[in-house]
Amino acid sequence: MKNNISFITILAIEAFLGIMINIGLSYVVRWQSLEPIEFMATFKIDYPLLLLPMLLTLLPAFFGCIWLMLHYSKNSLERKYWRYALICLIVIVLQTLVFHLPKNISFIEADYTGLEARGNLEAWAISHWIRSGIALVAGVFAIMGFKKGIENGMVSGDENR
């Protein structure tokens, strides 16, 4: 079961990373090309469309990391790697709640002047790429945890480690 959950968790983390890269390379580029007021009107339409895919990938990644961390022995390297992956995901969630969500709401409600919107979008984009990098690191730790589990006999069916 650990192998299956590991595989699903890795896929979820990497799918989330893929969504983040897509947002950075397509949506952000388009948003930056628009006039600020037009950007905020467009963001109001685009943002809800991005929420569901992000949630459908981040939630299984998050809960998979928790489950895997708790189902390896306390001092195992596998548990350490899954804990690090989980910490990365927690940092992403905190960064989103503290920085991105307030800006997203302000963009949607068009609370900024044109100049403020432009500056806040630039800060948002930089922070977005930082989140993407953290998601990449989470994926690396998840793969390391999975690999260590295989090396320590998980493939042979030792599900009680």
Image (cartoon, rainbow, N blue to C red):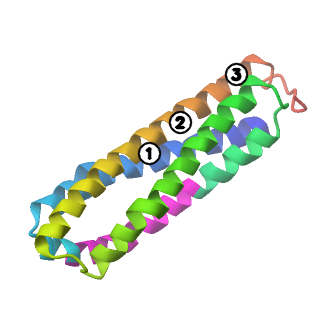
Region in magenta: 41-58
Residue at 29 percent of width and 57 percent of height: 124
Q: Give the labeled residue for mark 2.
A: 139
Q: Is residue 139 left or right of residue 70?
A: left
Hey, which quadrant is residue 115 in on the image?
A: bottom left
Do the residues under discs 2 and 1 have CB atoms within 8 angstroms?
A: yes
Residue at 10 percent of width and 60 percent of height: 33
Label the magenta part by its dominant secondary structure.
helix
- Kindly report the distance in space between the C-alpha atoms of the residues bearing marks 3 and 2: 14 Å
Residue at 33 percent of width and 45 percent of height: 129
Could you tell me residue 112's position as x and y percent?
Answer: 21, 76
Work out which quarter of the rendered image holds the N terminus and state it. Answer: top right
**Count of marks overlaid on the render:** 3
Disc 1 element: helix
| N-terminal label among 3 and 2 | 2
| N-terminal label among 3 and 1 | 1
Do the residues under discs 3 and 1 have CB atoms within 8 angstroms?
A: no
Could you tell me residue 63's position as x and y percent?
Answer: 68, 52
What label does residue 29 carry, if any?
none
What label does residue 148 carry, if any?
3
Could you tell me residue 154's position as x and y percent?
Answer: 79, 26
Could you tell me residue 143's position as x and y percent?
Answer: 59, 30
- Label 2 is placed on what type of residue? Gly
Q: Give the labeled residue for mark 1.
A: 17
